[in-house]
Image (cartoon, rainbow, N blue to C red):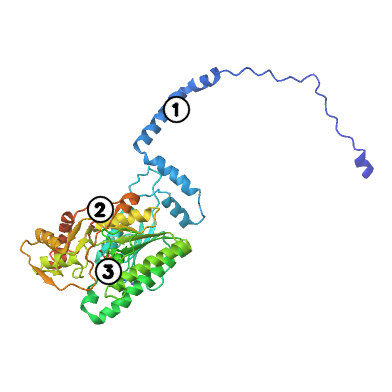
Amino acid sequence: MSSMSLNHRRPEIPQQSGNYTPKPPQKPWSLTKPVEYLCREQRVMFVVIGMAIASVFFFLQPQFITTTVQLQKSSSGYQGSGIATRKQQHVGGVISPGAKLPLGLQRKSLRVVVTGGAGFVGSHLVDKLMARGDSVIVVDNFFTGRKENVMHHFGNPRFELIRHDVVEPLLLEVDQIYHLACPASPVHYKFNPVKTIISFSFFASTNVVGTLNMLGLAKRIGARFLLTSTSEVYGDPLQHPQKEEYWGNVNPIGVRSCYDEGKRTAETLTMDYHRGADVQVRIARIFNTYGPRMCIDDGRVVSNFVAQALRKEPLTVYGDGNQTRSFQYVSDLVDGLMRLMESEHVGPFNLGNPGEFTMLELAEVVKEVIDPHARIEFRENTADDPHKRKPDISKAKEMLGWEPKVSLRDGLPRMVEDFRGRIFGDRKETSESAV
Ligand SMILES: NC(=O)c1ccc[n+]([C@@H]2O[C@H](COP(=O)([O-])OP(=O)(O)OC[C@H]3O[C@@H](n4cnc5c(N)ncnc54)[C@H](O)[C@@H]3O)[C@@H](O)[C@H]2O)c1
């Protein structure tokens, strides 16, 4: 067997001698062939038409070039998870406010949680996020917020409302967290001493434990976190106007300290999560804001004056009325909060209207708008009432391209209309957004 395989003869391959034809020599390269190719079937015309269309498109949509470059840059840092991808597109500026996107490159809608979203500022923020096409989850315990503020979104599949106290942990899958939950009105602790104690601990726990819970959530799911802090962190300021670099002059044991120190601690926690746990954070220091859906009778000066003037009651001015405040219309604030969230800057940023009014000047504007015959009644001032308050917003102007647009004289009538409806019940609860 083995000798057979060894002696096996291969089949004879026929010889091909004589049939070999060498390759013809290559012709020298000439321009005529490609030109002929291009000229055939009107190819040149199609190329020129294509170039013209592209030029017109980029001329009309210049943002597309920057947006695409930013998108490429951001996707080069892709981390793997769905949330990360979304976040990076976001960070890359694809959804920066005002950026126009060409058809087919629509921005991806985000999932956003707004704690305190049934409150005054929160509900206007929710309106704008919903209008932008995001999916919004409102988390609120209705301590000062109202369902009526957000019920015009009920039935929209992109909207959810959860009754929840932020002092308890919560697990949600979102891209962004706007943390507003905190009773911002001093009225309870001013008039009821028993509730004062409850409010004190409540304030502190909402600001500290609530913020801690939301930062923990942001860390777990890789979401971006925005804290709504306050101008109260400057206390009774010794610097005027207040810049973000100013560390403030706060009484740590006064009746307002629960709010002021609570917010200062919340800022500290936010920065520690940023430095220690790499959480993407943003801090806004909000100055006095007014507008529709503010709580009536919550002790804040604008809502007080408006409600009193509408009810034909005297306008109560505490102290001599020469202390100053700056008043920002709510749509300006919402615009600032969203710009900050989309920006690449941590902050803190002052968000307020630098127009400065004494309490007496404010009372005069309210009289002009509502009732020129309204009387002013002076009362003893409250403890630790800051003498001056005016934001320096140069940082927000320069880095966020933000500044308020609505003056007090333009904004006040919009609020008055809403208050009139709620006080006298002469029209339905407002669902109209101020934004
Ligand atoms: N409006 C202003 O002038 C102003 C100024 C500075 C800072 N801020 C800050 O902006 C945020 C919003 O203020 P606002 O004026 O809309 O106040 P608001 O009282 O109208 O809204 C606060 C919301 O948070 C909710 N809330 C409170 N405690 C909660 C808790 N433990 N769990 C869940 N929800 C809770 C309330 O029910 C309410 O809906 C607050 O953090 C406030 O400190 C507001």
Q: Amino acid at mark 2?
A: Pro
Q: In the drawing, does residue 83 fall left or right of residue 300?
A: right
Instruction: For the C terminus, give its image quadrant.
Output: bottom left
> Going from the N terminus, do you reach mark 1 or mark 2 first?
1
Q: Amino acid at mark 3?
A: Ala
Return the mark for residue 47.
Answer: 1
**What is the distance, in whole Å, between disc 2 and disc 3 at their CAs?**
21 Å
Label 1 C-beta lies within 8 Å of the nearest ligand 1 atom: no
Q: In this picture, is 77 found above or below 225?
A: above
**What is the distance, in whole Å, between disc 3 and disc 1 at their CAs?**
63 Å
Residue at horizontal 21%, vertical 59%? 327
Position of residue 207 measured from the top left corner of the image (x, y, whole percent): 35, 70
Residue at horizontal 39%, vertical 29%? 52
Position of residue 424 measured from the top left corner of the image (x, y, whole percent): 12, 67
Which residue does the numbered mark 2 point to in the structure image? Answer: 404
Which residue does the numbered mark 3 point to in the structure image? Answer: 184
Position of residue 206 measured from the top left corner of the image (x, y, whole percent): 34, 72
- Tell which of 286 and 77 is nearer to you: 286
Label 3 C-beta lies within 8 Å of the nearest ligand 1 atom: yes
Q: In the drawing, does residue 156 fall left or right of residue 217?
A: left
Q: Secondary structure at mark 2?
A: loop
- Tell which of 183 and 153 is nearer to you: 183
